[in-house]
Image: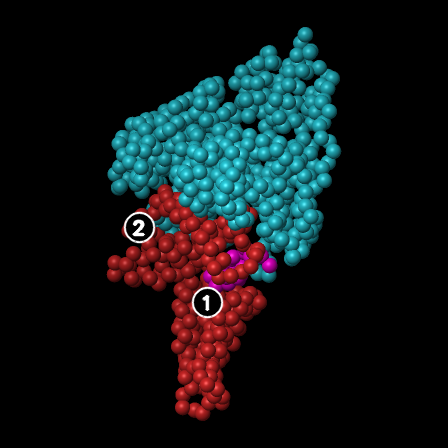
Chain colours: A red, B cyan
């Protein structure tokens, strides 16, 4: 519909405020649980485990009140690439020693490569669902405070945890703003005869039309970063001195339960 | 009054590529007493923001000293205490809100100071209630309106309980209602005993202060009460500034209306004083209204609806059955509070957005038709965004202006003469400016380059979104003059602005937007005559109109909706002079 709404297709990284069971969990539970699932999905060796992952995550998305159409949109964008990968995997993948179904020149479709393709086809959506789930239930503020507490032990080793967490926070806050800025610049160039949303599409054209976009975006980014640094300093932030925190995270029984469930689910994915 | 902030022979230069550049501040000495309300004014580049950043140790002078509450800013160990004492609110809320949730942003400063968690929560709540944002405490900042975001920025500072707050052009991006609220809050904080320093280009706001400091090229040029400063219009003009509209009007009237007291600085005071003069009861002869015939529209939109992020949980309705018709060769204004849909409507008029609902016609093109040649439409209708200089990407002025025409196929001499023509229109000499680096221009010059780069496509219609935002008074007057000239040359203009005086100066007809709709559309005088209707929609009348309408309600036979100073002065002179003979 509109060539300019850059934000619209990015579902990963968007927080969806709602009051579901998952939203109410402690931020640390969500972060640990989410990471655990992502690792398990990446490591799951069998189709059955991945199928469990897709089903379980779909149910979790429903439990988190994430509209399924919205979650699926996040899968649809990279789907063409994944399909290409799947086809390559199926046709050219190693077949093992089982007798292939089809052999035609370099093309060899064997049961093993078909299964590998299927795994790929399940793994990517499962990963995207897991990330969507984590980001939709975790506001940036939650993520920041959760990480801050989780990483605090590392500060004793001399790591600048506080600065890193602030950096993360600022990045999360500014990505949507930069997307809006990019949109505005693209529109402005289009009104000056630039080729956004008109004329033929080709790779070379695409590359050529991004230059007028990148230079101002870079400058705007720098300018904003500078203003922000000044604002942060003006409000008394000093990297190394200890800060206090308004948030008090409470670890409760249902957090422990949720974490146990996440571990069980992860184990199921890997072991089935 | 004890000296609270003390600047002693402060000189400061930004580390720059050019070795012998003029310092941003040059031997500035200034004493600020506790509880003062100071307006800091000056042309762009006069050093206002640099001075402000010295007040809470964001910058430390090259030579000289700054003391805040007796603490020198040169000593790093004093910085936490100094930043707790002097808070700053910047122009763009977006650039100073750090957290991703309202309440956490207010807590940010307190967390930095090491305040205990319980105390933080109590102060955050109290502060958010004070700025009426408590109900929004869990929302992400980018979901706030511009006015709310500015209040959040203020809350972040207030929570630290500073003794002084510096507002660095904090009202520049706000709509009239937001600006009114911000001014009221500054006055209230001042009444509570806080020291207020406000930087502004709006001379009307300077009248709230009890002291004015005028900067010029890094030095203090004038320092006094508003009355003292504004009694020297010639010196102000020389410094690139002008008088507040009320005082301009009062001075213009003082020469023709005898018996008008001096020093009238608010519209009600001026209305009262004028009303005390005897006047005739007969309306002055009005000139025949020229060009009353309605030209055929070049742009028309009917029943226009638009929803952003359609089909996602973030869907937001921006236009709802909006209507607009712009006559060929006319000048049309678009006003409305922030978020009323002005920008979205404009983007429909040159095909950046396609109509989701309703119809948009530009000349013979139907923009709802997918076969419509959008490039042709965009050549016909040029759109200049807010702060267009931010979109400059070429290194040299000439190349920047040539970008559009080059894409449309112009080459060689033809291209050159087109660029020269566009630069002439905005008053940039082709020979002198074509090879200048774009980054080395002043803000006003950059804006003119950006305008020229759109004009170079020779659009028949020019859409301008907040064309004067951020310009100092001189650059603003210059730009308004050039746009009027374009209009006289036959270019159709559509101007959106929060600056009612700009709308009055540039346009003849106005559309008022409110929550995505277009409830009012009509001649300038008619729209501006309805003060209550405007206030209801977060807008305001130009000062001249406020005074004219004030007199009308007291029985003066003035035509309704006067927006022009000269017209009001002329009419009043007629009414009063005849009677006193």
| Residue B425 image offset from top left, x and y in percent | 53, 34
Residue assigned mark 1: A131
Describe residue A223's horizontal placement relative to residue A4 as left or right. Answer: left
| Residue A11 image offset from top left, x and y in percent | 51, 63
Query: What chain is tagged by disc 1?
Result: A
Residue drawn at x 37%, y 54% as measured from the top left: A166
Residue B370 is one of the magenta-drawn residues: no
Residue lying furthest bottom in this view?
Answer: A99
Q: Which region is colored magenta?
A: A1-19
Mark 2 and 1 residues: CB-CB less than 8 Å, in contact?
no
In the figure, B297 relative to B32: above or below? below
| Callout 1 secondary element | helix
Q: How many marks?
A: 2
Describe residue B343's horizontal placement relative to residue A215 as left or right. Answer: right
The residue closer to the viewer here, B256 or B547, is B256
Magenta stretch prevailing secondary structure: loop
In the figure, A160 relative to A223: above or below? below
Residue A18 is one of the magenta-drawn residues: yes
| Quadrant position of residue B501 | top right
Residue drawn at x 36%, y 49% as measured from the top left: B111
| Quadrant position of residue B283 | top right
Residue assigned mark 2: A239
Quadrant holding the C terminus of chain A: bottom left
> Does the rendering let one see residue B374?
yes
Residue drawn at x 71%, y 15% as measured from the top left: B280
- Distance from the alpha carbon under mark 2 to that under mark 1: 30 Å
């Amino acid at each position: 519909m509109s060539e300019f709404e850059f934000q619209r297709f990015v579902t990963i990284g968007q927080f969806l405020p709602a009051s579901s069971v998952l939203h109410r969990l402690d931020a640390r539970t969500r972060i640990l649980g989410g990471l655990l699932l992502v690792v398990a999905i990446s490591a799951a060796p069998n189709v059955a485990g991945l199928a469990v992952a897709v089903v379980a995550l779909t149910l979790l998305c429903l439990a988190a009140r994430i509209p399924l159409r919205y979650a699926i949109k996040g899968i649809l964008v990279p789907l063409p690439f994944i399909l290409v990968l799947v086809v390559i995997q199926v046709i050219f993948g190693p077949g093992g020693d089982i007798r292939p179904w089809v052999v035609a020149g370099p093309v060899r479709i064997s049961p093993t490569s078909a299964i590998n393709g299927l795994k790929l086809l399940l793994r990517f959506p499962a990963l995207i669902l897991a990330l969507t789930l984590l980001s939709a239930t975790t506001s940036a503020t939650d993520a920041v405070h959760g990480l801050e507490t989780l990483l605090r032990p590392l500060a004793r080793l001399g790591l600048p945890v506080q600065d890193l967490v602030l950096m993360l926070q600022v990045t999360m806050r500014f990505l949507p703003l930069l997307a809006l800025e990019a949109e505005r610049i693209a529109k402005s160039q289009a009104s000056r005869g630039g080729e956004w949303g008109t004329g033929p599409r080709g790779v070379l054209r695409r590359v050529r039309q991004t230059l007028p976009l990148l230079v101002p975006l870079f400058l705007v980014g720098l300018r904003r970063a500078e203003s922000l640094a000044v604002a942060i300093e003006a409000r008394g932030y000093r990297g190394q001195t200890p800060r206090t925190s308004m948030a008090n995270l409470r670890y409760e029984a249902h957090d422990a339960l949720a974490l146990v469930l996440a571990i069980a689910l992860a184990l199921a994915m890997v072991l089935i | 009054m004890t000296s609270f902030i003390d600047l002693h022979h402060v000189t400061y230069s930004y580390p720059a590529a050019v070795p012998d550049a003029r310092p941003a501040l040059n031997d500035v000495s200034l004493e600020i007493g506790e509880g003062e309300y100071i307006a800091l004014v000056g042309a762009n580049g006069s050093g206002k923001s640099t001075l402000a950043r010295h007040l809470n140790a964001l910058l430390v002078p090259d030579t000289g000293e700054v003391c805040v509450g007796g603490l020198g800013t040169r000593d790093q160990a004093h910085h936490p205490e100094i930043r707790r004492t002097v808070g700053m609110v910047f122009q763009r809320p977006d650039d100073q809100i750090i957290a991703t949730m309202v309440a956490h942003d207010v807590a940010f400063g307190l967390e930095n100071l090491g305040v205990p968690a319980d105390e933080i929560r109590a102060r955050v709540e109290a502060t958010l209630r004070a700025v009426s944002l408590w109900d929004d405490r869990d929302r992400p900042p980018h979901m706030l309106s511009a006015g709310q975001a500015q209040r959040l920025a203020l809350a972040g500072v207030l929570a630290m309980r500073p003794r002084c707050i510096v507002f660095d052009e904090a009202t520049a991006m706000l709509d009239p209602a937001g600006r009114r609220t911000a001014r009221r809050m500054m006055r209230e904080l001042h009444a509570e005993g806080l020291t207020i320093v406000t930087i502004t280009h709006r001379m009307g706001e300077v009248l709230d202060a009890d002291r004015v400091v005028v900067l010029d090229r890094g030095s203090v040029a004038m320092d006094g009460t508003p009355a003292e400063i504004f009694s020297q219009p010639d010196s102000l003009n020389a410094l690139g500034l002008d008088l507040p509209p009320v005082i301009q009007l009062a001075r213009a009237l003082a020469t023709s209306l005898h018996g008008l007291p001096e020093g009238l600085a608010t519209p009600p005071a001026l209305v009262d004083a004028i009303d005390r003069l005897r006047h005739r009861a007969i309306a002055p002869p009005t000139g025949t209204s020229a060009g009353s015939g309605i030209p055929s529209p070049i742009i028309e939109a009917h029943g226009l609806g638009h929803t952003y992020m359609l089909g996602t949980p973030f869907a937001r309705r921006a236009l709802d059955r909006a209507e607009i018709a712009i006559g060929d060769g006319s000048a049309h204004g678009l006003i409305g509070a922030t978020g009323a849909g002005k920008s979205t409507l404009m983007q429909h008029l040159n095909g950046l957005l396609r109509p989701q609902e309703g119809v948009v016609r530009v000349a013979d093109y139907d923009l709802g038709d997918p076969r419509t040649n959008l490039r042709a439409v965009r050549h016909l209708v040029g759109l200049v965004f807010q702060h267009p200089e931010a979109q400059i990407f070429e290194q040299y002025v000439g190349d920047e202006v040539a970008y559009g025409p080059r894409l449309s196929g112009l080459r060689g001499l033809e291209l050159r003469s087109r660029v020269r023509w566009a630069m002439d229109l905005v008053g940039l000499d082709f020979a002198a400016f074509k090879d200048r680096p774009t980054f080395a221009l002043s803000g006003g010059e950059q804006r003119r380059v950006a305008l020229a780069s759109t004009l170079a496509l020779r659009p028949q219609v020019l859409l301008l979104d907040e064309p004067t935002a951020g310009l100092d008074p001189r650059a603003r007057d210059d730009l308004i003059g050039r746009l009027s000239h374009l209009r006289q040359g036959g270019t159709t203009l559509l101007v959106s602005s929060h600056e009612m005086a700009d709308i009055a100066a540039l346009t003849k007809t106005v559309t008022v937007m409110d929550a995505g709709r277009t409830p009012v559309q009509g001649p300038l005088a008619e729209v501006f005559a309805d003060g209550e209707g405007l206030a209801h929609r977060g807008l305001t009348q130009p000062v001249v109109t406020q005074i004219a309408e004030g007199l009308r309600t007291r029985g003066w036979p003035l035509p309704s909706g006067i927006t022009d100073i000269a017209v009001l002065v002329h009419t009043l002179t007629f009414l009063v002079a005849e009677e006193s003979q």
